[in-house]
Image: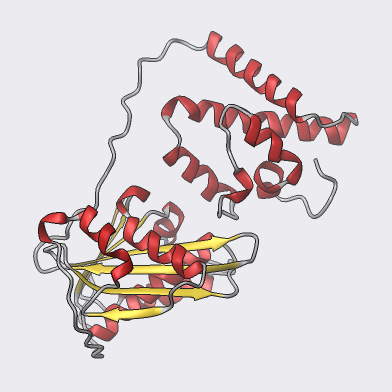
């Protein structure tokens, strides 16, 4: 579309400057290029999570229209006109819907909330943030006990980052290392990245740029007696999300043990107000344990 740079899938559908007007002025009013994902499947999964059901069809017909337009430019020497493409997308969607059987109104997914772990377990929420414009990123980790109390947190910026998934994996590695150093034995890991959860579950060798980080994570999982890995929706991961974004902007860079920073207290309270508290002391003890491992993945 733009005639510049290497053509990749994420560039064709999302990052191409020529598409800025198409996404922004179209029905979705989408600032696609500002979305942090640098992998097409990660972007698609996230859009399916955040878009209302009635707009998912709009999103996918838009992708199909972009692909058709790209082929017309390449093979038929046509010119790219964003407003015409928007009109054709809307018309294609109308035509598609007219010939489809009427579907019953789909039940809207209910908003999920963070839930405290079972008695005797700790829950580690992890999140990575990636900034396309600078190639930097940040990670956020928050640990809470079975009463919903924040007992540890990590916020760490990365000057150089490969992708959003790279930051998700780094957040997981940091959370697991913290757990090993503190001697925790039974933990639940929660992430809103479908790709990360799938990668941790897979027994295959990952040969991407984050393969080494994922290998570390899988090794560290063996340092716990029991580990459960769960995918959650983003609205249930707000505390780790705030830490990751603040770290990616180089606002904070620290590790808190036996406390959580004041800057996330309001989000902690929103998640679990009944057992909210703030511990004012910090004890950074180190320990190590390596009992038999029991791992289960929950999706």
Out of 48 and 262, give the one closest to the viewer. 262
Work out whether 296 lies above or below 180. Answer: above
Residue 88, by quadrant, is: top right
127 lies above or below 15: below
Q: Judge from the rendering whether residue 147 lies leftward or rightward of residue 160; answer left or right.
A: left
Image quarter hosting the N terminus: top right
State whether residue 50 is above or below residue 76: below
Residue under the image location 58 percent in, 75 percent down: 159
Residue 279 in the image: state x and y as whole percent: 17, 76
Q: Is residue 233 visible?
A: no
Residue name at image x 65 percent, y 60 percent: 133
State the residue in front, 229 or 49.
49
- 178 lies left or right of 63: left
Q: How is the image coloured?
A: secondary structure
- Residue at the spot 74% in from the left edge and 26% down from the top edge: 83
Q: Residue at x 26, y 59 (%)?
A: 266
Image-quadrant location for residue 72: top right
Q: Position of residue 289 (x, y in %)?
A: 22, 86
């Amino acid at each position: 579309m733009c005639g510049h740079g290497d053509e990749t899938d994420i560039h064709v559908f999302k990052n191409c400057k020529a598409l800025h007007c198409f996404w922004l002025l179209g029905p979705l009013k989408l600032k696609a290029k500002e979305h942090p994902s640098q992998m097409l499947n990660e972007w698609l999964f996230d859009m399916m999570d955040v878009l209302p059901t009635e707009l998912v069809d709009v999103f996918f017909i838009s992708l199909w229209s972009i692909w058709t337009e790209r082929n017309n430019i390449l093979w038929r020497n046509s010119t790219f006109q964003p407003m015409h493409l928007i009109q054709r997308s809307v018309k294609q969607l109308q035509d598609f819907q007219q010939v489809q059987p009427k579907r019953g109104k789909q039940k809207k997914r209910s908003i999920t909330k963070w839930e405290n772990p079972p008695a005797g377990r700790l829950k580690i929420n992890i999140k990575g943030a990636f900034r396309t414009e600078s190639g930097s990123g940040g990670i956020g980790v928050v640990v809470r006990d079975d009463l919903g109390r924040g007992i540890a947190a990590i916020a760490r910026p990365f000057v150089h980052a490969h992708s959003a998934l790279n930051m998700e994996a780094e957040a997981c590695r940091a959370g697991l290392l913290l757990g090993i150093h503190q001697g925790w034995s039974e933990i639940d890991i929660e992430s809103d990245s479908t790709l990360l959860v799938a990668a941790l579950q897979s027994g295959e060798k990952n040969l991407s740029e984050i393969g080494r980080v994922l290998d570390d994570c899988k090794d560290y999982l063996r340092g716990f007696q029991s580990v459960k890995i769960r995918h959650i929706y983003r609205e249930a991961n707000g505390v780790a999300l705030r830490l990751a974004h603040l770290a990616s902007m180089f606002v904070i860079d620290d590790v808190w043990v036996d406390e959580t920073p004041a800057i996330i207290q309001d989000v902690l309270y929103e998640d679990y107000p009944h057992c909210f508290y703030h511990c004012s002391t910090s004890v950074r003890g180190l320990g190590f344990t390596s009992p038999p491992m029991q791992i289960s993945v929950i999706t």
